[in-house]
Amino acid sequence: MSKNFTYNEIMEKLTDILVDDFEIERSLVTPEANLFEDLELDSIDAVDLAVKLQYFTDKKIAPDRFKQIRTVDDVAKTIAELLE
């Protein structure tokens, strides 16, 4: 059962996932940070992130939508849209 989260709650959880699971320095996780260039995630990391977010939201991000995601803000906005 999913819950409505605010944008800030989504960003907080997303930041925690990136810091705890992907060992990214917290100060690097900003809304404009590019997942692949700035945070150095690879395609396998991206899939792992999508799975972790699915557990958090109980919603699956469509593969076509996920391919369009580039920044931390893109992820947060996509999650917010899914939960509407």
Image: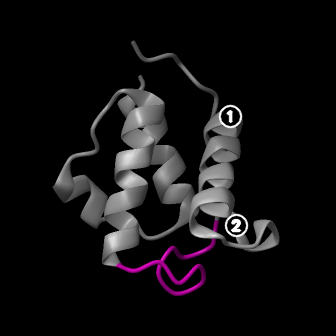
Q: Which residues are magenta?
A: 32-42
Q: Residue at x 32, y 72 (%)?
A: 44
For the stretch drawn in magenta, the main secondary structure is loop
From the viewer's perspective, tell me whether residue 82 is left or right of residue 21.
Answer: left
Q: Is residue 70 above or below residue 42?
A: above
Q: Residues within 10 Å of mark 2 (few under 14, many from 20)?
A: many
Q: Label 1 is placed on what type of residue? A: Glu
Q: Quadrant of the N terminus?
A: top left
- Residue 5: give x, y in percent of width and height: 59, 25
**Residue 7 appears in which quarter of the rendering?**
top right
Q: Is residue 78 above or below residue 59?
A: below
- Residue 29 numbered tag: 2
- Residue 12: give x, y in percent of width and height: 71, 44
Q: Secondary structure at mark 1?
A: helix
Q: Give the labeled residue for mark 1.
A: 9
Q: Is residue 46 above or below residue 16?
A: below
Q: Residue at x 65, y 46 (%)?
A: 11
